[in-house]
Amino acid sequence: MSYRLTIDIDPQGERWAMLLDGNDMPLFYPTLYNTTNLRNAGKATSTQELHLTAIKILHESCDIQGIKLTERIRSKNFLTTGELDGLSDACRQKKRGVKQSSVVSLKNGHAHPMVKVNSTTHYTYLRCIAAYLKWLCEILLGTERFTAEANRAIEALVEGIRARGVTGASRAGDDDTLRGMTQSQETKLFQILQPGSDMNPFTDAGVQVRNYVLAKLTALTGSRGGEILNARTSDIDWEAGTLSIVRRADSKQDPRRKQPRVKTNQRVLPLTQETLTEIRTYIVHVRKHIPNAAAHSYLFVSHKSGPTQGQPISLSSLQALFATIRRTYPDLDISAHDLRHRWNWRYSETMQHQQKIGFTEAEQLRNVLAGWSPQSKMGQRYNKAYIQKKAYEAMLAVAQQRELGMEELKKAKKTHG
């Protein structure tokens, strides 16, 4: 059986994900799980999608292995070691965001090479499946049949699934907070995106202006891509020179199924006059002339002709922008989120030279600008790469100082010898 994941918008503007079967009918238990455990708990649509993607993998794996899941659970005949290995292998395959070419390479036979997810995603899928299966066992067995023995078997099942993923401790060394872009990469990125540049891979002049302003606003504010895509023209205070980052979960005015969301606190961020001028130029000379753009106030809109022309651009469009950059310039292996990491690096460098602002106050200010709570430790995560660089420099300085001391001793020894 085939399965399909979809996202719908109800009349109140709420986005919710559903897992459908081959007849486009919602699967009963995954829908119940999503409603009771995810939607009712206020989980974001992206979280619902993640869990349902994992459940989709579970169903596909069961179909391939000939496992009738609900019957097996009711009979307390839980998954075997081999079946769990098959499930783990299924979780390693890329499940979304992959467009495969129709051209088949004879070097690899007649099958497309399997695209694998990273270890973190693999572990996340397994963790979501384990949580769903534990819930499903409790639902199907009920209180009368949920004995102590059954409970032990279910816990063993859950642990068996989790054990096939890389644990959090093992993933600590693969921390994406160490990523980011260098100064030279950032400089090259904006040389490429500069409207009219011969290096710009986007041919449409209006798209060039939009992309440049979008990337610059992200870089200068350190905001998430979703926060910038959520911005409206009314969020800009032209006199004060500020941009308000506003939470608008499940907005009726937002036509996007995957609505970009503000994950952190609302806040007001300052903008330079140069940036304000560039935004105004985009609004007046580009956005104004895009059909259907006047129907809403979202700042950045789709220019491509078709049913979505003039609508606010999607997260996938932002990802496609940077995918085009990476494809055209392979040395720029960066994403929109790397601009946020780069902002945190520049902030750390700037604060280091502020004599009137100590480290504690600087981190408090970072939390305000990033939308984190006053007690948040997220700044330490984003600051990790910078701290490691300073630690490296400090260690090198100590080593060089020691070398100088050793040279002085050698010279003194020769003089007295």
Image (cartoon, rainbow, N blue to C red):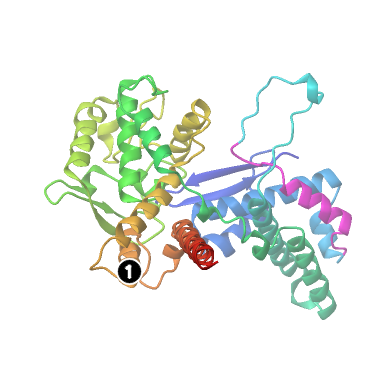
Q: Quadrant of the C terminus?
A: bottom right
Is residue 94 shown left or right of residue 322?
A: right
* Residue shown at the point (46%, 30%) measured from the top left: 325
* Depth check, front residue: 299 or 221: 221
Question: As rendered, which of 190 and 23 lies closer to the eye?
Answer: 190
**Numbered disc 1: secondary structure:** helix
Which portion, as a residue range, is magenta?
77-97
Q: Is residue 314 magenta?
A: no
Relative to 401, say whether 300 is above or below. Answer: above
- Packing grade of label 1 (10 A; few <14, some 14-19, many >=20) is some
Query: Quarter of the image containing the N terminus?
Result: top right
* Residue on which disc 1 sits: 364
Residue sitting at the far bottom: 148
Q: From the viewer's perspective, is 271 left or right of 262?
A: left
Residue at the image position 32 percent from the left and 61 percent from the top: 352
Viewer can see residue 252: no
311 displayed left or right of 395:
left
Pinpoint residue 254: horizontal percent, then vertical percent.
36, 44
The answer to whether 283 is drawn above or below residue 104 in the figure is: below
Is residue 96 one of those drawn in magenta?
A: yes
- Residue situated in front as seen by the camera: 94 or 14: 94
Closest to the observer, 409 or 39: 409
Residue 366 seen by the camera:
yes
Q: Amino acid at mark 1?
A: Gln
Location of residue 377 (image quadrant): bottom left
**Residue 70: where, in percent of width, then height?**
79, 58
